[in-house]
C-alpha cells in the first residue's frame, strides 16, 4: 500500500545550515542530530494536533453556550411579556373589585334603608291590626248606624273608606318593601360572590406573577452562569491558541533554518554551473520513480501548520524500498545526509541542469561518481523531515528550482 506523503520543509531564502557530507558521509553525529530533531518535531506536531483538537472542542462548546444564551434570553423576554399581561389583568381585577365593593356598599345602605322602612311599616300594620281586633268587627257598622243625618252617614262612609284604603295601601307598601328587600339581598349575595371571585382572580394572578418572577430570576442566573462559562472558555481557548502559535513559531523557525539547505544547494550549483549554457530547452528526462504526485511544485499551504510556503519540487508517493533511478546521465555532486532532505543525491547533468532526490532510505552512489540514465542511485524511504515514504524530486537550472513537470514526459 503506497502511503501518501509530503515534505514538511519550509523552503526559504535563508543562510545555509547544513550540507551533504562528501561521498555519502555525515557520520553518526549528523544522524543522531537528525533523529533528535525529528523526534522533537514529531512531539511538537502531536502537541499541536492535540491543542488544535482542544481549540475545536472549545469552539463547539462556545457555540453551544451561545445557543443556550439565546434560548434563555428568549425565555426572559417571554416571561417579561407574561408578567406585563398578568399585571394588566391584576390591575383590571383590582379595579373591578373596587367597583364591586362600592356597589355592595350602596346595596347595603339601601338594604338598611329599606329594612328600616319595612320595619316601620310592619309596626304600623301590626298596631292597626291589633286596634281593629280590639274594636271588633262591628266598629265600622256602629259608626255608620249612629249617623245623625244622611249627609253625616255619607261623611262617615267616606271616612271609613279612607281608613280602609289607607290600611290596604300600607299592606301593599309593606309587600312591595318586602319584595324590594328580597331583591336587594339577592343582589348583595351576587355582589359578594363577584367580590370573592375577583379576590380569587387577583390572588391567582399574584401567584402567577410570583412564579413568573421566580422563573425570570432563575433564567437570569442561568444566563449569568452561561456567560461566565463562555468567558472562561474563551480565556482558556486564547491561552491554548497562544500555546499553539508559540509551538508553530518555534518549529517554523527551525524549519526555516533547515531550509537553508535549499539555498546552500542553489549557491553550490550556481558556482559549479556558472559557465554552463542551458541546453535542455526541448529535451525530456524520464521519471525517477513511478507513482502519484502527493504534493506538487509551487506555492502551497503547509499540511501541518496551515501556513503558506513554496515547495521546490515534486513529492511522488512510493512505498519503502522502491529503487530510485537517475533521471539522466551526469556526475554526482553530493550524496549524503542533510537535516531536512534526509538522504539526498544531487546530480549535475551539464547544460546548467541538475536534479535532486531526497528522503531516500539508502544511497547507492557516492560524490564524484558518474552515473547513467536509469541507474539506481538509492531507495525510497522517509529520512529527514517528511510524513511518510516518498521521493522529493527537484529539477534545477543554474541552481534555481524549476517546475519538474516541464521536463518530465
Image (cartoon, rainbow, N blue to C red):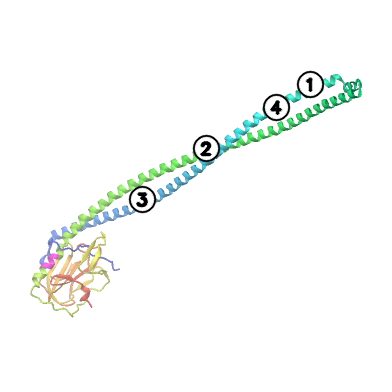
The answer to whether residue 339 is magenta is no
Which of pointers 3 and 4 lies earlier in the amino acid sequence? 3
Circles 1 and 4: CB atoms closer than 8 Å: no
Return the residue found at the far top: 134
Q: Magenta part of the protein: which range?
A: 263-267
How far, Cα to Cα, is label 1 from label 3?
94 Å
How far, Cα to Cα, is label 3 from label 2?
38 Å
Q: Residues within 10 Å of mark 3 (few under 14, many from 20)?
A: many
Identify residue for label 3: 62
Residue found 73% across the figure and 24% down from its top: 120
Task: Looking at the picture, tell me which residue is in the foreground, 390 or 203.
Answer: 203
Name the spot of residue 29 as percent of width and height, x first.
13, 58
Identify residue for label 4: 115
Which label lies toward us, 3 or 4? Answer: 4
Which label lies toward us, 2 or 4? Answer: 4
How far, Cα to Cα, is label 2 from label 4?
39 Å
Circles 2 and 1: CB atoms closer than 8 Å: no
Q: Decide if residue 275 is on the left or right side of residue 102.
A: left
Which of pointers 1 and 4 lies earlier in the amino acid sequence? 4
Q: Look at the image and tell me in which quarter the C terminus lies.
A: bottom left
Label at residue 206: 2
Identify residue for label 1: 127
How far, Cα to Cα, is label 3 from label 4?
77 Å
| Prevalent SS, magenta region | helix
Amino acid at each position: 500500500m503506497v502511503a501518501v506523503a509530503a515534505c514538511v520543509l519550509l523552503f526559504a531564502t535563508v543562510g545555509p545550515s547544513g550540507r551533504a557530507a562528501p561521498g555519502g558521509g555525515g557520520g553518526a553525529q549528523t544522524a543522531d542530530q537528525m533523529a533528535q530533531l525529528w523526534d522533537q518535531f514529531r512531539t511538537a506536531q502531536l502537541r499541536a494536533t492535540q491543542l488544535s483538537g482542544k481549540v475545536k472542542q472549545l469552539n463547539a462548546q462556545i457555540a453551544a453556550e451561545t445557543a443556550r444564551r439565546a434560548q434563555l434570553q428568549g425565555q426572559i423576554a417571554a416571561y417579561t411579556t407574561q408578567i406585563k399581561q398578568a399585571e394588566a389583568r391584576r390591575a383590571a381585577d383590582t379595579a373591578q373589585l373596587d367597583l364591586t365593593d362600592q356597589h355592595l356598599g350602596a346595596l347595603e345602605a339601601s338594604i338598611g334603608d329599606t329594612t328600616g322602612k319595612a320595619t316601620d311599616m310592619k309596626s304600623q300594620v301590626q298596631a292597626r291590626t291589633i286596634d281593629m281586633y280590639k274594636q271588633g268587627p262591628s266598629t265600622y257598622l256602629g259608626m255608620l248606624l249612629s249617623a245623625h243625618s244622611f249627609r253625616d252617614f255619607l261623611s262617615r262612609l267616606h271616612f271609613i273608606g279612607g281608613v280602609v284604603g289607607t290600611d290596604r295601601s300600607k299592606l301593599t307598601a309593606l309587600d312591595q318593601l318586602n319584595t324590594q328587600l328580597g331583591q336587594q339581598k339577592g343582589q348583595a349575595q351576587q355582589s359578594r360572590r363577584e367580590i370573592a371571585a375577583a379576590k380569587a382572580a387577583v390572588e391567582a394572578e399574584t401567584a402567577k406573577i410570583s412564579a413568573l418572577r421566580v422563573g425570570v430570576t432563575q433564567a437570569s442566573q442561568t444566563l449569568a452562569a452561561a456567560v461566565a462559562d463562555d468567558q472562561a472558555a474563551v480565556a482558556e481557548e486564547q491561552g491554548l491558541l497562544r500555546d499553539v502559535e508559540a509551538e508553530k513559531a518555534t518549529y517554523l523557525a527551525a524549519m526555516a533554518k533547515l531550509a537553508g539547505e535549499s539555498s546552500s544547494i542553489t549557491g553550490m550549483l550556481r558556482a559549479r554551473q556558472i559557465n554552463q549554457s542551458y541546453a535542455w530547452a526541448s529535451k525530456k528526462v524520464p521519471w525517477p520513480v513511478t507513482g502519484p504526485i502527493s504534493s506538487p511544485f509551487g506555492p502551497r499551504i503547509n499540511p501541518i501548520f496551515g501556513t503558506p510556503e513554496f515547495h521546490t519540487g515534486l513529492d511522488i508517493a512510493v512505498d519503502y524500498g522502491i529503487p530510485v533511478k537517475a533521471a539522466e546521465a551526469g556526475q554526482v555532486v553530493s550524496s549524503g545526509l542533510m537535516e531536512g532532505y534526509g538522504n539526498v543525491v544531487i546530480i549535475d547533468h551539464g547544460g546548467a541542469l541538475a536534479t535532486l532526490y531526497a528522503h531516500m532510505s539508502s544511497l547507492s552512489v557516492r560524490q564524484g561518481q558518474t552515473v547513467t540514465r536509469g541507474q539506481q542511485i538509492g531507495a525510497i524511504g522517509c529520512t529527514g523531515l517528511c510524513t511518510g515514504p516518498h521521493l522529493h524530486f527537484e529539477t534545477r537550472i543554474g541552481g534555481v528550482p524549476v517546475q519538474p513537470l516541464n521536463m518530465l514526459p
